[in-house]
Image (cartoon, helix red, strand yellow):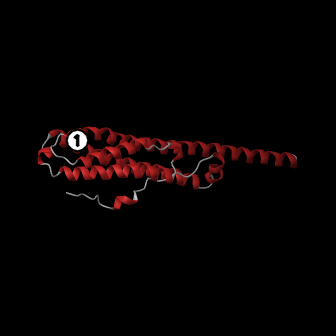
Amino acid sequence: MKKGTIVLLSVVGLVLMLFVGACSSYNSMVNKQENTERAWATVQSAYQRRLDLIPNLVATVKGAANFEQETLTAVIEARSKASQMTVDPSKLSPESLQKFQASQGQLSQALGRLMVVAEQYPQLRATQNFSELQSQIEGTENRIKVERDQFNNAVKDYNAYIRKFPQVMFAGLFGFDKKGYFEADAEAAKAPEVKF
């Protein structure tokens, strides 16, 4: 074989290897990106379940005589704000997740105050509807935590993958950017203030 033919075959072989590597990396990045977006959708579904339960809880609590209207209003307003805040799964930046968490954090605090204040009303705690709703909300909060943890695991897997060699060469080229983690709101460290 001629020297020029050997060089040409080597170059063609190298280009073919790069193409196959790029295709493989691209497909893996797409799968991991889809996994993070699916995980985020599951987180949103868990939060939606909580939003769906709140009107039933508020209606049950309204039946209690002399219940603090201010507490109920805070829950209703926080629910309204939380239901308006959405995050595009393809743009899971730390900033967008912080805004989402802030709105959900306000709702969590309002619900916490509602549950603490409800302890003052033995006739309310004794009702089966309130007990069932309280149990469902507690279960939903646990689901939210589990789904957030699974989301963070999917983001970790995705972020680590796109930063490793050789994927790092193709990630920027194909528009695969680092995703944000779901982090606790700074206010989460403070206990809700309850006034009797």
Give the percent coordinates (x, y) of residue 84: 42, 42
Q: Position of residue 196 (x, y in %)?
A: 19, 57
Name the residue nearer the viewer: 19 or 195.
195
Count of marks, rendered view: 1
For the residue pair 164 and 42, the one nearer the viewer reads as 42
Where does label 1 land, which residue? 133
Q: Quadrant of the N terminus?
A: top right
The image shows residue 129 at horizontal and vertical percentages of 18, 39
The answer to which of 34 and 107 lies nearer the viewer is: 107
Q: From the viewer's perspective, is 137 left or right of 161?
A: left
Disc 1 on helix, strand or loop? helix
Q: Is residue 102 left or right of residue 62?
A: right
Task: Determine the residue positioned at 27% across, 44% down.
Answer: 137
Depth check: give the residue in front, 151 or 81.
Answer: 81
Name the residue rendered at 42%, 56% in the picture.
Answer: 183
Looking at the image, residue 53 sits to the left or right of residue 102; the answer is left
Q: Tell me what residue is drawn at x 61 percent, y 46 percent.
A: 25
